[in-house]
Image: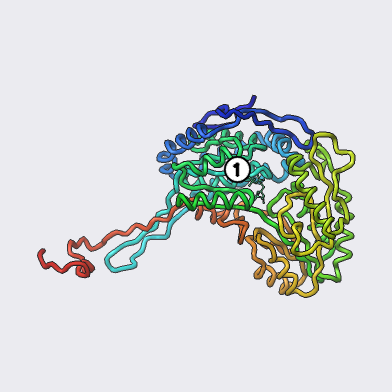
Amino acid sequence: MTELNFIDGAHRAGSGSETLTIVDPSTGETVATGASANATDVAEAVAAARRAFSDWSRRTPGERSDIMLAWADLLEARAEEIAALESRQGGKPIRLAEGFDIPGSIDNVRFFAAAARNLEGKASAEYSAEHTSSIRREAVGVVGSIAPWNYPLQMAAWKALPAVAAGNTIVLKPSELTPLTSLIFAETAHEAGMPAGVFNVVTGTGAEVGAALVEHPDVDMVSFTGSTRVGREIGAKAAGAVKRVHLELGGKAPFLVFDDADLEAAARGAVAGALINGGQDCTAATRAYVQRPLFDDFVARVAELMESVRIGAAGDPETDLGSLISIAHRDKVAAMVDDAEANGAKIVCGGEIPGDAPEGTAFYRPTLITGAAQDSTIVQEEVFGPVLVALPFDTDDEGIALANDTPFGLAASAWSTSVFRTQRASREIQAGCVWVNDHIPIFSEMPHGGYKASGFGKDMSQYSFDEYTNVKHVVSDITAAAHKEWHDLIFTSDQG
Ligand code: NAD
């Protein structure tokens, strides 16, 4: 049995009655088993985080930064091991884990190590003749962070790094399907010198452990990445307790191709953007709107490229597309595709489990769909699988309107060789990120976060400090007078 919690600087078994089994869904093999945490473990982790807060929040930025730089080195030294684990617990192709998940997370640690030293309030100044004002940015306190399974280490990094860099302490609940790399993340932070209790991990289901964390009265802030459905629930609870909350939720990214676009670039971009991580990516390209003159050629080329993708076990370096996270999730994806077909859409390629998929695995073929109605479920709701819908449009106005026509607003891309069209699309598409002639790349220095039902607040970049700090206005009298002029508004005694 693996100890699936890291509390107060030590690995610990959970106190819950449930045994969690972490499975490689691309082989069906068990990767680890361990006891689930329960509300008692959450309370202990929150208490440890509270005890650690006053020391950690008072460390100088330089001290926090040095520890984080050492942390990045420890992660780098174990990068191969972490990538293998990340790949297995998610059915994620090892090439993706090695080339994206792990280096991206390490780069994030280094970015926040530097950013910690650049966190500043506004310079002092006089906004009245009698006072000097200054701004302090202070850590919020104990942060309860909840992460999804799709990019386990990167999501843990996006939640934990700005929080601890700014002097907060955290209790992270990874997905119960994929906790293993988050545990190494917390362990290496501690080895690098982060005091016990600053970074804790509790593993269990959302309904039990996640809810206990959100509802704990000593958690000052909840930071959540996951589905819009759960985000709504957490947001309502946080509002009830007047707790700060940061929500990174679902997406349904449009991929808008104008008729002057480079067709080959757009087709390749659509396949990569739709299939990354098996389409289990909140920013994945899901709705390709293609201006009519290019539509047929786009569909043909995307289908051809999708058919060339090699499906296989996560650990095989030849594998392009691993499995989905679980059989239950694969079945949900398949049901959504079947429903689209039953409602008149056409499956151009894919739309099924590969015939040779071994028993107990969760593979699904790359799928291209045309002919779906704009208001249908497959176009409006998150599928979170290797499924792209392509629909034609005629005028630029129509294309942009269709791109905006879902409840989500996380990411989008616009493809054109005209600067006027791409500038217009960047301005008018309602999303936290608009790529121009590309789709997916992210950088530690730049923010990630949603509009509309995709949530609010930013991960990564200096902007994320706005979530994890309180802004305090300090006002100092500079007159040294006992009788201040403004007192006369309240009382007019001339004594003294
Ligand atoms: P999910 O919402 O089911 O679960 C996310 C996390 O919340 C898990 O750790 C889960 O255990 C926990 N949880 C579930 N119910 C809870 C509850 N009632 N109280 C507290 N915690 C609870 O999402 P998922 O299936 O793990 O991940 C996929 C979703 O995440 C997709 O919708 C995807 O778009 C979204 N996502 C968003 C971003 C972003 O940056 N916006 C990034 C990655 C994933």
Judging depth in this view, the residue of 4 and 74 nearest the camera is 4
Using a 10 Å C-alpha cutoff, classify the residue at mark 1 as few (fewer than 14 neighbours), some (14 to 19) or many (20 or more): many
> What colouring style does the render use?
rainbow
* Quarter of the N terminus within the rendering: top right
Position of 264 with respect to 1 (left or right) is right
* Quarter of the C terminus within the rendering: bottom left
Residue 355's x, y, as percent? 89, 41
Does dot 1 land on a helix, a strand or a loop? helix
Q: Amino acid at mark 1?
A: Ala
Position of 458 with respect to 239 (left or right) is right
Residue 299's x, y, as percent? 86, 61
Residue 343's x, y, as percent? 82, 58
Judging depth in this view, the residue of 295 and 188 nearest the camera is 295
Position of 212 with respect to 483 (left or right) is right
The residue furthest top is 1
The residue pinned by badge 1 equals: 156
Q: Residue at x 65, y 31 (%)?
A: 20
User: Which image quadrant is residue 110 in?
Assistant: top right
When the figure is inspected, residue 345 is found, relative to residue 20, above or below; the finding is below
Judging depth in this view, the residue of 489 and 477 nearest the camera is 489
Is residue 187 something one can see in this rendering?
A: yes
User: Which image quadrant is residue 58 in?
Assistant: top left
The residue furthest left is 495
Residue 103's x, y, as percent? 67, 44
